[in-house]
Image (cartoon, rainbow, N blue to C red):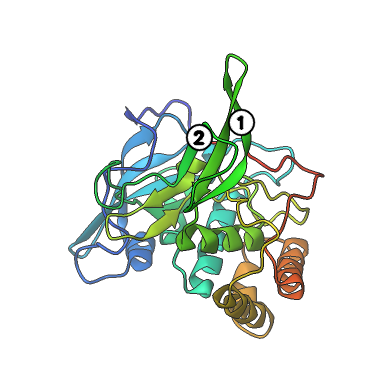
Amino acid sequence: MPTSERVPAIGGGLNGGVPADGVDGGISGAELLARGELTVRGRLRDASNAVLYCEIAHEGATAHCVYKPVAGERPLWDFPDGTLAQREVAAFLVSEATGWGLVPPTVLRDGPYGEGMCQLWIDTPEEGEAGGDGLLALVDAEEPEPGWKAVGFAEVGEGRTALLVHADDERLRRLAVLDAVINNADRKGGHLLPTAAGGLYAIDHGVTFNAENKLRTLLWGWAGEPLTDEAVDVLRKLETELGDGGLGARLAELITAEELAALRERVAELLRTGRHPEPSGEWPAIPWPPI
């Protein structure tokens, strides 16, 4: 993204847009993102990479989205340069293959600052509104209350610690499985977007699909526990799609052959163990900052 260009900065947090299933005009979110005219309206100031807030329109259908141009990506030591947008799209494709719909519609397309990832903007309720209850919390306790799962203890200042917990929520459990599959190296609390209709979306999947084990997440509450029957069925379906199905071919255009092979191996390992993965001890298990 050219440094000479300036667009208005807006607050962080993907909030105040439209629901991912609420596109006007009878067109799917992914189709609108791929075919629509993209107009930049602002920039999310808290993002580490260039993240632009845009309006997208096509034949009477309109929505808002985020556009992350490849030119605005910050180089990372452990991921090839200029590949974060492709990984975001790959995460969407895997999410769609699971049938869980956990990642908002996401495409790779050209835009005002070159090729980049374009993802439908998600409207999230405020805490206290329907669907706006928190999914993560810090509690002054040794054990989580019913309905919550422990992640670990965290320093909260002045020598005090608190127990970090997340909701014992089926939506989060599905997401924990998806993150294990895509090898998400940065699942933070701010990436969880509950909707007023009771759904859940997850965003920011640029640091995924590494061939090395880099799973870092706040969703360790089920570590070592048996996978649900639903998750096992989904993983078997994924295994087929990555083999003889079309998913493997589509992902091959977005990630390397080594990364695709590692993805297949992760799915096979989850099916072999039948359990949620546990921290390896070879890599920090919790992202920082956690939010």
Q: Residue at x 20, y 63 (%)?
A: 24
Q: Regarding mark 1 in the picture, which secondary structure is present there? A: strand
Q: In the image, residue 255 lies at what x, y percent?
A: 67, 61
Looking at the rendered structure, the kind of residue marked 1 is Ala
Q: Residue at x 74, y 73 (%)?
A: 268
Looking at the rendered structure, the kind of residue marked 2 is Leu
Q: In the image, residue 253 lies at what x, y percent?
A: 63, 66
Q: Quadrant of residue 263?
A: bottom right
In the image, residue 160 above or below residue 153: above
The reply to whether discs 2 and 1 touch (Cβ–Cβ < 8 Å) is: yes
- Mark on residue 210? none
Q: Residue at x 67, y 78 (%)?
A: 239
Q: Residue at x 49, y 46 (%)?
A: 145
Q: Which residue is mark 1?
A: 154
Q: In the image, residue 142 lies at what x, y percent?
A: 60, 37
Q: Is residue 159 among what the camera can see? A: yes
Q: Quadrant of residue 78?
A: top right
Separation of disc 2 and disc 1 at Cα? Answer: 8 Å
Q: Which residue is mark 2?
A: 138
